[in-house]
Image (cartoon, rainbow, N blue to C red):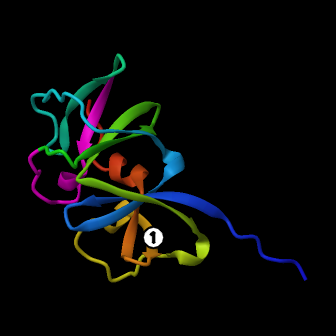
Amino acid sequence: MKEKTVDWKELTIFQVADITCAMDILKIKEIIKHLELTRIHNAPDFVRGVASLRGEIITVVDVRVKFGFEPAPLNEDMRIIVIRHKDENIGLLVDRIWDVHRVNDTVMEPLASNINGVNRDFFSGIYKMEEGLATVLNTDTLLDSEMSLQ
């Protein structure tokens, strides 16, 4: 009898308002503590600004605002998660980074169909941790919805 192989991956656990989120660590280029942000006139509300990261201009998206919350004042706990999206680096401003967990498919569940509130398309599933649950962020749908900044 053939044994089922278990796929392992590492998830970065972070906080956005009162939502605990997770993201596959392979999607993350780096996590930045502080960047000087410059506001862009007439940019969508969720664009917190742009920043220079080693000479490259990146757009920083406030995930709180994408989730429908009010923006929070910048503080020491906030971090910018830099990811690659459609051939450019994008920064995701989050409230706090908690930890990195090594997980397998047995602790992942699909989203329940009755989830309301934050756009459920922003999430690809639920990760069951000892400390509670974390919603797994789908960065493609998060950034594709209204992300056209022409």
Place of residue 35 in the rendered image (x, y in percent of width and height, measured from the top left): 24, 30
Q: Quadrant of residue 1?
A: bottom right
Front residue of 146/23: it is 23
**Left or right: 79 with respect to 141?**
left
Q: Is residue 81 magenta?
A: no
Per the image, the residue denoted by label 1 is 125
Most distant residue in the right direction: 1
Q: Which residues are magenta?
A: 57-73
Q: Residue at x 45, y 70 (%)?
A: 125
Q: On screen, 118 above or below 99?
A: below
Say what secondary structure mark 1 lies in: strand
Q: On screen, 9 above or below 114?
A: above
Number of residue marks: 1
Place of residue 150 in the rendered image (x, y in percent of width and height, measured from the top left): 26, 30
Amino acid carrying label 1: it is Gly
Front residue of 85/71: it is 71
Place of residue 42 in the rendered image (x, y in percent of width and height, measured from the top left): 10, 32
Question: How many residues crowd around disc 1 within 10 Å: few (fewer than 14), some, or many (20 or more)?
Answer: some
**Left or right: 23 with respect to 75?**
right
Q: On screen, 12 above or below 1?
A: above
Q: Quadrant of residue 5?
A: bottom right
Q: Residue at x 11, y 51 (%)?
A: 71
Place of residue 11 in the rendered image (x, y in percent of width and height, measured from the top left): 48, 59
Front residue of 62/145: it is 62
**Left or right: 136 with respect to 80?**
right
